Amino acid sequence: MEYSFFSKGHVCNLKEFKIFGGMDLDNLNELLHDGLTNDNEAEVFPLRYTYDDLVFPVQYIRISPIATFGRSFNYSIWYVEIRGIKKNSILSQVFDAYIKVLQKNMMDLYHLLKEKTGVEFEHPLISNLHQALVIDSNFDEAERIIHNAEASSIFDHYVQTAKYSLLWQEIYASNSDGDTPCPRGGHQMCIDVDSGKIYLFGGWDGSKDLSDFWCYNIEKQRWKLLSSDTLADGGPSARSCHQICFDPTKKSIFVLGRYIEPSTNTTIADLTGNTYGSDFYQYFIELDQWIKISDNTQIDGGPPLLYDLQMCVDPVDRILYVSGGRIAAPGSTSYAYGGLYAYDMIASSWETLRHDEITQGVRSPHSPDEAYLARWAPGNRSPLPIQTIKGRAGHSMAIHAEKRGIYIFAGQRERSHLSDLYYYSIDEKKFNNVVENFFKGDGSDIGYTQRATIDEDMKELYVFTAYVNGMPSNTVKNLIWVYSIEKNHWEKLYENESQDSCSSNCIKSIEPTPRFAHQVVYNSKTKAHYIFGGNPGDHKNEHRRLNDFWELKLAKPTSTQIVRKCIYLIRARKLYEMCDKKLHINGGRLELNSNMRKDTMSALNYLRDYILPLVDHENREEVAQFKQLCAHLCIPTYGKNDVNCEMQTEDFIFASRTKVFQHLLEYFPRNMKEPDGSVMDSVKIL
């Protein structure tokens, strides 16, 4: 390593430093401990690269300053030059040599260590699998061991901890007349899980509010127009940014809220009429009938007119909960937000569970005494009364009926984007702060229009975030997160973004175009999400809205699928070796043997009868591997560096079996197998 300087000696130059290097950023070895002479001459330092005559490769270098020539001065490094060998042709040979040495079949040393120390290095099942697959090439026994592992529920841990894979499917459906809901954003959807029907109402098409009402039959894959104008049918007027919610007990849908453009100009009609009245409707599905519950819920003790609010139904106590939303008031453009309200469906009465906190210097009414906030602290689940949560709009809310609680996530307050998660206990009437600032630790962007769904069986909360704040060129970006309620753990499942219509069109063929102001519902029976419409953020055409319809399924591998994959790998390895029987060693060279025709037919029958039925034809990787097997059946080959002698051929076969064995180990729990990584990573060079 060479150091050069900007000019003559400087107080910030390194008087003492260390250099570390290696292949792993978390496990670097000390290569040099030295210092500069503090003049204007370049200095070259040799770095250590051997240990006990063993050359080790270096991919990462870390310079750790210890002291400068001037006391209490910052460190300064003017110029550094690294010298070494970086040609791939040379480095690849070194790596290949190391791998071959590490994969030598030194089972006698392994058994000697095990006998002398009495330590079980791995589970006996793993040892038996290695013996059958790698040592004895007893592929049938290896398959039997895999089936025994499944019977012992060994693969359950992998299934539980595996990451979700996302399966997108665009839905092309219409009604009997060939019509579909028009493009829109700010619409609302709800789902009747029992009947398998999705309801869609209202929205903004880019120029006006809509009042059409649709139903989608999941099983029949058909839309049905329930009403082209709900106002004419005794229902709500055209609106957007409202909220609808399904009541599974009465098979009805509640509608509340609507967007009104904030304005300082107030007319007499605004003050005397019902322009700003919070009308409240209920639609009875079986009767196909609208009921107007209230002209103004604020007069009835409920919320004022809100938009970008959230609602959910507690089917046990028959309570409709309303959370947040921005208040629409005549002659005001200020920020004011709704609190938390409860509507008793049986008594037809409202209760304010909490008001919003201080807004624009004006104190809102006090929240009820019993509605206080509790912070979840590690090791302390006792609620501690602190400041109540902030009112918000554009947030998400999901109810956990079995747990008797409501989750409220993120949203926007004034010009601030919130990224907190709260849990409200219905029985105790307490708020619990689950996450104060979720995106702070993750470093991700904060979305505005969140859409959250919940799976009570899986105990998971799924959050769809959109229209990310602070991105260059107003980038539209979608992210999907899953929150484990039991583990209190977040995991990012999906991320995409687009900055122009071209990239959006490229994405559209396999997954939805990035968007905001869309809607998401979840079918807990089929474990499928449904996404409709939204605003793609097309700045060349600001009126453009979407009406595409998508189904999303989050899939984890089952133990049966893991067994299929393992058996497929074992049989593929067996086929390779059946093909290689057509070759024999003659004078250090591989040649075709006399039984080539018989061996080829045997391998072909095995491929057709035992491997083809296992191939997942929806998996592109497996299909490509199967094609390679077919090609190898016709032209068996070894690596170009492994065909010169019998010893190299044996090494190649052993390494190939070991590779399959290591692949199988990925599905076993960590406490059953050897540690991940290389043994060399645990050895510090002294």
Image (cartoon, helix red, strand yellow):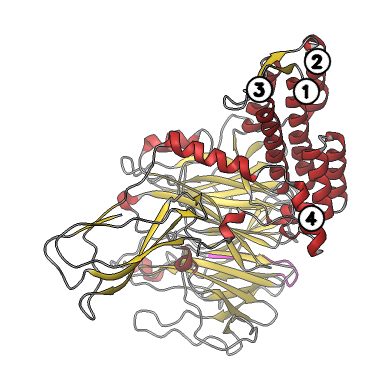
Q: Give the range drawn in magenta.
A: 310-318
The residue that label 1 is drawn on is 578
Q: Is 256 a magenta residue?
A: no
Confirm or deny contact between disc 1 and disc 3 (CB under 8 A): no
Residue at image coords 24%, 81% = 72
Residue type at mark 3? Answer: Lys
The residue sitting at 79% across, 39% down in the picture is 135
Q: Which mark is residue 627?
A: 3
Q: In this view, does 280 lie above or below 73?
A: above
Spatial CA span between label 2 and label 3: 19 Å
Q: Is mark 1 on a helix, strand or loop?
A: helix
Mark 4 is surrounded, within 10 Å at the Cα level, by few (under 14), some (14 to 19) or many (20 or more) other residues, namely: few
The three-letter code of the residue at mark 4 reads: Leu
The residue beneath circle 2 is 599
Picture residue at 55% right of the left edge, 43% below the top:
228
Quarter of the image for residue 662 reads top right
Q: Position of residue 633 (x, y in %)?
A: 71, 18
